[in-house]
Amino acid sequence: QITVSFMGCIPVTIGDNVMQPFEPELDWSRFSLQPAESQVAQLHTIVESVDDKQIARMQTALRCAAQHFVWSSATGSFMKESGRYDAFETILEILRVKLEHPTAKPEDYNKLDDDFRRFMACGAEKLGDDPPSEPIPQKLCSHSLLEGVKPSTCYKCIRGSSLEYGLPGGTICCGKGSMNLAKCHRTWA
């Protein structure tokens, strides 16, 4: 589900009682199909019943949701994302709401906290609405040649000495004598 989300494909998860990443705080029904195991024989009908307008709305929600699944503030960008809504920031936001509303059910956080709802919708009023354009004052380091950029100055920091596996990069303070991610600035701050 996570990998297909990065590729822009609507996830189809067949499995009863499967909890997805950041569920129930993130409403997966807005960007995925989750037929029950008993519906496998009707899967073609379920998929074909999704109209073009619904697909467009789900793909808009998916572009936002996919950002919550990656650790781009630590590993760098590959979807041209800023890192503002990445997995690390999502965990912090969930913890903030849990602290402010300790007796609330996680599935109710969107109703209780407007800032949380907008965060989970990447700045939009609700997940599936077009989010506002986000100015990116400093681009994250990129792992992707698909972004059409040459490797940035932090490329060696991301890749380390290996061409296959790299040290956590992204916003890591490469070349400043510090490898403490918590001390690095955020691109959206």
Image (cartoon, grey):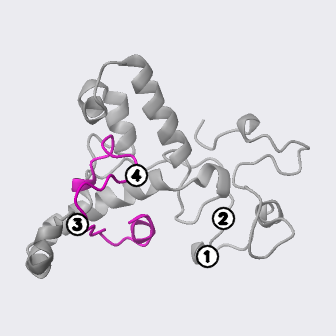
Q: In the structure shown, which secondary structural element does the residue marked by tag 2 occupy?
A: loop
Question: What residue range appears in magenta?
Answer: 1-29
Marks 1, 2: nearer the viewer:
2
The circle drawn on residue 14 is none
Q: Callout 4: 10 Å neighbours few (<14), some, many (20+)?
A: some
Where does residue 171 sit, x and y in percent of width and height?
70, 49
**Of label 2 and label 3, which has the lower sequence position?**
3
Marks 1/2 in contact by CB < 8 Å: the verdict is no
Amino acid type, mark 4: Pro
Quarter of the image with the C terminus in it: top right
Marks 2/3 in contact by CB < 8 Å: the verdict is no
Residue, far right: 177
Q: In the structure shown, which secondary structural element does the residue marked by tag 4 occupy?
A: loop
The correct choice, above or below, for 50 with respect to 92 in the image is: below
Q: Callout 1: 10 Å neighbours few (<14), some, many (20+)?
A: few
The chief SS type of the magenta part is loop
- Residue beneath disc 2: 142
Amino acid type, mark 1: Gly
Q: Callout 2: 10 Å neighbours few (<14), some, many (20+)?
A: many
Does any portion of residue 48 appear in the rendered image?
Answer: no
Marks 3, 1: nearer the viewer:
3
Residue drawn at the location 40% of the way across and 18% of the way down: 100
- Residue beneath disc 3: 56
Residue drawn at the location 29% of the way across and 23% of the way down: 104
Residue drawn at the location 58% of the way across and 72% of the way down: 147
Quarter occupied by residue 126: top left
Left or right position of 55 against 156: left
Q: Is residue 14 magenta?
A: yes
Where does residue 51 sit, x and y in percent of width and height?
11, 72
The circle drawn on residue 148 is 1
